[in-house]
């Protein structure tokens, strides 16, 4: 059996844990630079605030409806997510962290368990230890556990946050109630193709010829169909190294001077290099890009990029940042107001198994230096040590006018009990 444990309105729920005044009130969380709505409470959904709403257009609506608007507090959300996932690991050794707010669990050797009670125990412990409400769907396959979770979430009062698919009769009943567009992995393109086969529900999908699905929707669609038929074909994914690492950000303001652009690129490159070392990899390729504001009609939209091929693989912040800054110098144009930039590294190889270059190689001092920097930054839970061309006071420069405190990750912002 598989379980999907999903945190309800995760970002809003994290804010409510440390600000109980937000309980049972409409709350909306904004994207980077306070752009648009990316998460909200059930109360805000009922009022009619749409996902993706640009806040500058909906500010007056939110004021009239008394919707609390907050900037994204990613350090808080990341820490709360880690706490939830740590709790889930106590309930099964086989876990796949699917996203920041949901995980799959596989129950091997749980033949005589009462899954209704076990799922309730999971919900209660997470709520008690973290304050985050969750829903749990349990079924014989990952695909069906997704369906069960959606049913539990949609009918929260009736299900009490738990839905178990433990019989073929229940599987068929719930699949008939699930619209095809609500099925995990069925995007808009697949929906159109399936509707030509008169497929409007998840159950209809299970009745289509498997040969047609394999031919038209590939092996991925076939596995999903089998999962919905109760035949497990989608296993838990093992944690693997990324094949590409990217750090891209929109600026809090537009930049037209090269010095500010170079500082941002150096910071982005340093972040990529750190992630690279965390997965014990080196990179061969660095891709740097600059973008102007595509919504500003007063100037022509500009987008430039440059790819750097390194002579030898590296994980050194010094090497990667220097190459990225040199690249951005060649694509920067005077007079252009840039709004977004990014660094993407690829051509990743293990740091203990790669092709050497006869004439060029990494400076041998870089390895111990990077190791020392990473150790200190981990010890003090912050990027205390940076390159000289980085802003020493801030990692990401974003517009965050409605930011809540970092209650769990900054000692100066913890709650004070009086």
Image (cartoon, grey):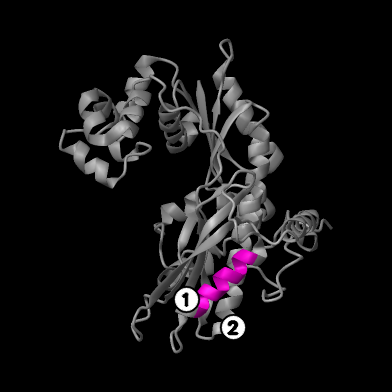
Seen in the picture, residue 324 relative to 244 is either above or below; the reply is: below
Of mark 2 and mark 1, the one earlier in the sequence is 2
Which residue lies under the disc numbered 1?
A: 339
Would you identify the image quadrant in which residue 303 lies? bottom left
Would you identify the image quadrant in which residue 335 lies? bottom left
**Quadrant of the rendering where the C terminus is positioned:** bottom right
Question: Is residue 396 at least partly visible in the picture?
Answer: no
Question: Is residue 330 at least partly visible in the picture?
Answer: yes
> Which span is picked out in magenta?
319-329
Seen in the picture, residue 115 relative to 202 is either above or below; the reply is: above
For the point 58% across and 47% down, the residue is: 354
Q: Kindly give the residue lying farthest to the front in the view shown.
A: 358
Q: State the residue in front, 146 or 136.
A: 146
What numbered label is drawn on residue 271? none
For the point 70% across and 71% down, the residue is: 387
Name the element at disc 2.
helix
Q: Position of residue 165 (x, y in %)?
A: 44, 21
Q: State the residue in front, 268 or 80.
A: 268
Q: Is residue 280 magenta?
A: no
Q: State the residue in front, 124 or 192.
A: 192
Q: Position of residue 319 (x, y in %)?
A: 63, 65
What numbered label is drawn on residue 259? 2
Q: State the residue in front, 383 or 191.
A: 383
Q: Nearer the viewer, mark 2 or mark 1?
A: 2
Name the element at disc 1.
strand
């Amino acid at each position: 059996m598989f379980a999907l444990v999903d945190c309800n309105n995760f970002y809003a729920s994290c804010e409510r844990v440390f600000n109980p005044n937000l309980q049972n009130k409409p709350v909306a969380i904004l994207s980077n630079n306070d752009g648009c709505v990316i998460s909200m409470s059930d109360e805000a959904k009922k009022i009619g605030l749409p996902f993706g709403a640009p806040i500058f257009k909906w500010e007056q609506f939110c004021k009239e409806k008394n919707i609390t608007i907050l900037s994204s507090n990613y350090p808080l959300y990341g820490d709360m997510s880690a706490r939830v996932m740590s709790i889930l690991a106590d309930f099964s050794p086989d876990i796949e962290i699917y996203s920041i707010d949901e995980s799959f669990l596989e129950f091997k050797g749980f033949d005589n368990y009462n899954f209704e009670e076990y799922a309730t125990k999971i919900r209660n412990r997470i709520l008690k230890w973290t304050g985050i409400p969750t829903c749990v769907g349990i079924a014989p396959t990952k695909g069906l556990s997704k369906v069960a979770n959606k049913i539990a979430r949609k009918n929260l009062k009736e299900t009490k946050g738990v839905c178990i698919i433990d019989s073929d009769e229940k599987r068929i009943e719930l699949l008939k109630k699930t619209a095809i567009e609500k099925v995990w992995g069925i995007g808009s393109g697949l929906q159109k193709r399936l509707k030509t086969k008169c497929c409007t529900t998840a159950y209809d999908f299970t009745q289509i010829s498997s040969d047609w699905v394999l031919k038209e929707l590939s092996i991925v669609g076939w596995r999903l169909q089998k999962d919905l038929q109760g035949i497990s074909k989608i296993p838990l994914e093992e944690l693997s190294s990324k094949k590409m690492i990217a750090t891209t950000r929109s600026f809090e303001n537009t930049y037209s001077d090269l010095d500010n652009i170079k500082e941002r690129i150096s910071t982005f490159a340093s972040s990529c290099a750190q992630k690279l070392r965390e997965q014990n990899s080196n990179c061969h390729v660095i891709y740097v890009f600059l973008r102007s504001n595509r919504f500003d009609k007063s100037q022509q939209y500009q987008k430039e990029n440059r790819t750097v091929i390194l002579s030898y693989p590296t994980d050194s912040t010094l090497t990667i940042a220097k190459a990225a800054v040199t690249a951005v110098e060649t694509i920067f144009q005077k007079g252009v107001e840039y709004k977004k930039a990014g660094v993407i590294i690829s051509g990743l190889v293990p740091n203990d198994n790669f092709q050497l270059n006869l004439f060029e190689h990494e400076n041998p001092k870089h390895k111990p230096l990077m190791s020392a920097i990473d150790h200190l930054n981990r010890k003090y839970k912050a990027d205390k040590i940076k390159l000289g061309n980085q802003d020493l006071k801030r990692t990401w420069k974003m517009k965050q006018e409605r930011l809540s405190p970092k209650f769990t990750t900054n000692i100066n912002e913890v709650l004070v009990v009086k």
